[in-house]
Image (cartoon, rainbow, N blue to C red):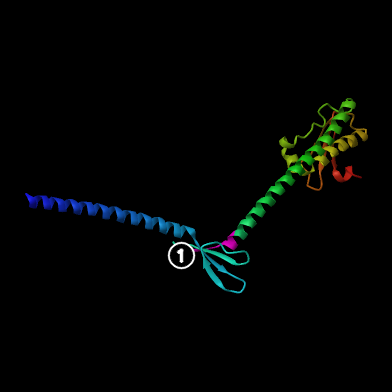
Amino acid sequence: MSKVLDITYNLFNLTFIHNILGSAMRFAVIFLGILFSAHTSAGVYKCTGTDGKTAYQSTPCVAGQRNIELNVKTGGSTDLDEQQKQQLEQQKKIDQDKLEQERLKQRQAQLKQAAADESAKNQFLIKNNPGKFSAYAIPPYQFDQLPVVVKNHQNRLPDIERFRRQAAERALATGACSRVEASELNARSAQDALVFLINCSSGKSFYYNEQELTQ
């Protein structure tokens, strides 16, 4: 009976010691894993001064030194100076694009306003001369809904509206057009040579280019 108790006691001690050692081993493995991860994630920096001397440290290099980060896990490296330069260039391009977009919006707003001012003059002329102009002789061109032929020259929209009025008045001045029914930009137009077609109530038509209208 005594021997049985001794054997049982020894087995219990061995099991207890085994459990203790197992727990300690698992803790050690976990601790080393955490320690290794912390070490590798910290990074290593290769710093080269103007004198050519190189130092390896766990913190980024000071200003004036070439700054290279080494990845101890993969063996790769990153030139932080070049990376920062690329980031600055990308940000500069983004800022330039934003500035250009703002300038484009401003130019479009000015263009729309100038065209609206000329169109208002056209409507004033028609309203005060109903015998010479049809009510729809010079309908305003809407910047966001331009006919194809006008859209091709939309950057000259204020000029187009002004020339439509001048072309209509030129046709009336011939004496062969008693009333203007329509004054439109014509498909014959080129960017620097706009052409306008005037249709009269008599059925007669007139073509004027901008060179004629500016004489």
**Secondary structure found at label 1:** loop
Evaluate whether residue 45 shows in this view: yes
Instruction: Measuring from the top left, give residue 155's x and y in whole percent.
Output: 77, 44
Q: Where is residue 212 in the image (x, y as percent from the top left)?
A: 88, 44
Which residue is found at the position 62% from the left and 72% from the top? 50
Relative placement, left or right, of 158 versus 68 is right
Percent across and percent down for residue 34 are 40, 55
Q: Which of 121 and 82 is in front in this view?
A: 82
Q: Does the magenta stretch include residue 55?
A: no
Q: Could you say which is closer to the camera, residue 194 or residue 179?
A: 194
Q: Which quadrant, please, contains the C terminus?
A: top right
Residue at 71% x, 48% y: name it. 99
**Number of numbered callouts drawn:** 1
Residue designated by label 1: 75
Residue reaching furthest to the front: 2
Kindly identify the amino acid type of the residue bearing the numbered disc 1.
Gly
Please tell me how crowded label 1 is: few (under 14), some (14-19), or many (20+) other residues with Cα within 10 Å: few
Task: Tell me if residue 129 can be seen.
Answer: no
Q: State the image coordinates of residue 20 (x, y, percent, origin top left).
A: 26, 53
Q: Is residue 87 left or right of residue 77?
A: right
Residue 80 colored magenta?
yes
> Start and end of the magenta stretch?
74-83
Vertical arrangement, residue 80 with respect to residue 204, above or below: below
Question: Looking at this view, is 172 or 129 the one in front?
Answer: 129
Residue at 52%, 68% in the rendered image: 56
